[in-house]
Image (cartoon, rainbow, N blue to C red):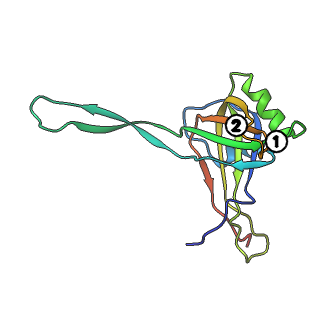
Amino acid sequence: MSLFPTAGAKLYIGRAKAQKSADFTEADFSSETWTEIADLENLGSLGDTSQPITVAHIGYPRERTLKGVRSAGTMEVICSVNNEDAGQIAALAAEKTKHDYAFRLVLTDAPETGSAPAPSERMWIAKVMSVSEAYDEANNVPKLNLSLAVNSNVVKIAATTGD
C-alpha cells in the first residue's frame, strides 16, 4: 500500500456530457477538453452508495434490507474565490444550465519509477447544483462552494509507470 497526499491534486471541468444507460469508461472521456478549477481547498468525497430497500413481512421477526439503485452522491468542493479562474468561471456557467458536465480528478500517486509515470485519475459526469460564496470570519478569504451531483459511475484509472 502506498500512501499519498491530497495536496497537489487537480480538479477539472469539461463540456456538457449526456448521460447513458451503461457505465462510462475511460474511452468516453478521451476527446474531452479539460479546464482546471484552481485554488482548491477541499475536494469532499466521491463514491457509490446503494439506496436501501426495506421490507417487513408479518411472518418474520426482522425487517429485511435489500440493495437498491446506486448513487455517487454529491461532491462538495471548496475553493478560494478567484474571479479570473477559467475553471471557476466554467463551474458558475454550468450551474446555470440543466446539463451534466464531465469532471476529472488527477491525484498525486504517480510512481517514482518508470519512463513516464502518471498518477491515477477519476472521471465522472455531474450537475453543478449550486455555487455559493462563503465569507466566514475576518481572518479568512472568501470561499466558493460547489455542489456536484454525480450522475454516473466514477471511472477509476490506475497510476502507471509508463513502461
Residue at 70% across / 32% down in the picture?
17
Residue toward you, 96 or 146:
146
Task: Identify the image quadrant of residue 90.
Answer: top right
Residue denoted by label 1: 33
Q: Residues within 10 Å of mark 2 (few under 14, many from 20)?
A: some
Query: Are the residues flagged by discs 2 and 1 in contact, CB closer than 8 Å?
Result: no
- Residue 33 image offset from top left, x and y in percent: 82, 42
Task: Indicate the secondary structure of the residue bearing disc 1.
Answer: loop
The residue drawn where x is 81% and y is 37% is: 88
Residue at the far front in the pictured view = 138
Q: Taking 94 as reference, is 45 above or below it? A: below
Q: Nearer the viewer, residue 64 or 132?
A: 132
Q: Return the disc, 2 or 1, that comes first in the chain's sequence.
A: 1
Identify the image quadrant of residue 14. Answer: top right
Front position in the image: 142 or 58: 142
Residue indicated by mark 2:
145
Kind of residue at badge 1: Thr
In the rendered image, the quadrant that contains the N terminus is bottom right
Is 118 drawn above or below residue 50 in the view shown?
A: below
Q: Position of residue 28 (x, y in %)?
A: 68, 42
Q: Quadrant of residue 89?
A: top right
Under tag 2, what secondary structure?
strand
> Image point 67% across, 64% down: which residue?
5
Q: What residue occupies the far left of the structure in this picture? A: 59
Image position, residue 160 (x, y; %): 69, 67
Residue 66 x, y percent position in the rendering? 30, 38
Is residue 23 left or right of 114 when viewed as pictured?
Answer: left
> Callout 2, which amino acid?
Asn
How packed mark 1 is, by other alpha carbons closer than 10 Å (few <14, some 14-19, many 20 or more), is few
- Closer to the observer: label 2 or label 1? 2
Q: How many labels sit on residues?
A: 2
Image quarter hosting the C terminus: bottom right
